Image: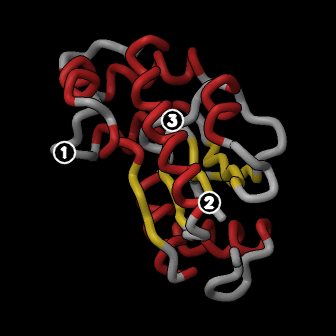
């Protein structure tokens, strides 16, 4: 099984994804680590990515998800997946690829981004993410303002993943 933890920058995708994977004894992959260098450079300059910029990244993630599913590898993937068209490419099989949407207000995400250092994503791009965001249908929606442990517990219950290796 693959669980995609999605949301705008600052929603806690990496933190929650890592904690969820650890609690399930699954692998964790941060989608940001799969961006081509040109995308990272563009965002560092404060420029929003276009659909064309995201195309190779989405194709790469889609191929990885296919490999994970083919090898029965359980993975938690942190990935913004802001648009429905992106999610359509990533959710190859809805019974095996599940979405968790970390939702929250702009003010919370902006506050979190201001407190973050060393990340490639500048806080001035947050508005472009909210503009691009198409809230998912069929995802488990979780309030991102909660404590991380509470979010992980809610995700595990919501997805029926109450024990390690539950995705198998």
Across and down, in percent, residue 91 comes to: 69, 43
Quadrant for residue 159, please give it.
Answer: bottom right
Q: Residue at coordinates 22% horizontally, 35% vertically from top-left?
A: 120
Q: Secondary structure at mark 1?
A: loop
Name of the residue lying farthest toward the front = 70
Nearest-to-viewer mark from 2 and 1: 2
Q: Secondary structure at mark 2?
A: helix
Across and down, in percent, residue 165 comes to: 63, 84
Above or below for 1 versus 39: below
Name of the residue lying farthest toward the bottom = 163
Is 116 left or right of 98, judged from the image as shown? left
Q: Earlier in the sequence, mark 2 or mark 1?
A: 2
Which residue, given by chain and number where applicable, does mark 1 sit on?
A: 117
Please state, as top left, top right, bottom left or bottom right, where the N terminus lies in the image: bottom right
Above or below for 48 versus 96: above
Please state, as top left, top right, bottom left or bottom right, where the C terminus lies in the image: bottom right
Q: Earlier in the sequence, mark 1 or mark 3?
A: 3
Compare residues 121 and 25 and report the one nearer the observer. 25
Which residue, given by chain and number where applicable, does mark 3 sit on?
A: 8
Q: Residue at coordinates 51% horizontally, 75% vertically from top-left?
A: 26
Quadrant for residue 7, please give it.
Answer: top right
Q: How is this picture coloured?
A: secondary structure
Q: Secondary structure at mark 3?
A: loop
Q: CA distance from mark 1 to mark 3?
A: 17 Å
The crowd level at tag 3 (other Cα within 10 Å; few <14, some 14-19, many 20+) is many
Above or below for 44 versus 64: above
Q: CA distance from mark 2 to mark 3?
A: 25 Å
Marks 1 & 3, CB-CB < 8 Å contact? no
Marks 2 & 1, CB-CB < 8 Å contact? no
Which residue, given by chain and number where applicable, does mark 2 sit on?
A: 69
Q: Residue at coordinates 16% horizontally, 44% vertically from top-left?
A: 118
Marks 2 & 3, CB-CB < 8 Å contact? no
């Amino acid at each position: 099984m693959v669980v995609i933890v999605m949301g705008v920058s600052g929603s806690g995708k990496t933190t929650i994804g890592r904690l969820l994977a650890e609690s399930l004894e699954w692998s964790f992959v941060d989608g940001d680590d799969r961006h081509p260098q040109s995308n990272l450079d563009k965002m560092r300059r404060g420029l929003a990515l276009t659909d064309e910029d995201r195309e190779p990244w989405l194709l790469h993630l889609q191929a990885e998800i296919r490999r994970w599913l083919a090898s029965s590898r359980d993975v938690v993937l942190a990935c913004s997946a802001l648009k429905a068209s992106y999610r359509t490419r990533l959710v190859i099989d809805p019974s095996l690829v599940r979405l968790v949407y970390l939702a929250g207000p702009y003010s919370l995400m902006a506050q979190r981004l201001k407190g973050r250092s060393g990340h490639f994503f500048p806080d001035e791009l947050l508005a472009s993410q909210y503009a691009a965001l198409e809230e998912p249908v069929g995802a488990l929606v979780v309030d991102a303002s909660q404590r991380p442990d509470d979010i992980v517990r809610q995700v595990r219950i919501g997805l029926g993943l109450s024990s390690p290796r539950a995705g198998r």
